[in-house]
Image (cartoon, grey):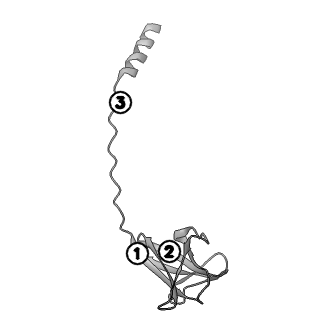
Amino acid sequence: MKKQVKAAAKTATKKKPAKAAKKAAAPKVALKSVTFTVHAEAGQEVRLAGSFTDWETKAKKMTFKKKNGVYSATVKLAPGEYQYKFIIGDKWATDDQNTEFVPNDKGTFNSKLVVK
């Protein structure tokens, strides 16, 4: 009886493994460049934070454009819905140029953006 068990075990280990099925390649999502702008006093530190930065307060520094007097930042986003705010100095602000808002868990609102 013992010889049969050993023989079966040897046979099982000698089999070649089946070829792994090729995984279907996930389709690449086209990212869209989105430019955010906000009016703020020159010389301030202005940052962009949102669901696309995990609300990291230092994630995206905005650049002051002297020609038109606004801060701007461009990010690449996949199609979807996002929430964001500007941090001007140490104050959080919604986008006054965007009429789409959603309530947040802080009792205030976030600006909403839909990328198609």
From the image, which quarter does the C terminus lie in? bottom left
Q: Which residue is mark 3?
A: 17
Identify the residue at image location x=43%, y=17%: 9
The amino acid marked with disc number 2 is: Tyr
- As drawn, the label of residue 109 is none
The amino acid marked with disc number 1 is: Ser
**Image position of 66 with respect to 19: above or below:** below
Separation (CA) of disc 3 from disc 1: 46 Å
Mark closest to the chain's N terminus, 2 or 3? 3
Q: Under tag 2, what secondary structure?
A: strand
- As drawn, the label of residue 82 is 2
Point out the frontmost of discs 3 and 1. 1
Identify the residue at image location x=54%, y=71%: 51
Q: Which residue is mark 1?
A: 33
Q: Under tag 3, what secondary structure?
A: loop
Separation (CA) of disc 1 from disc 2: 14 Å
**Image position of 49 with respect to 26: above or below:** below
The amino acid marked with disc number 3 is: Pro
**Image position of 115 with respect to 39: above or below:** above
Q: Under tag 1, what secondary structure?
A: strand
Residue 94 appears in the rendering: yes
Mark closest to the chain's N terminus, 1 or 2? 1
Q: Are marks 1 and 2 in contact (CB under 8 Å)?
A: no
Please provide percent x and percent y for residue 23: 34, 47
Identify the residue at image location x=40%, y=16%: 10
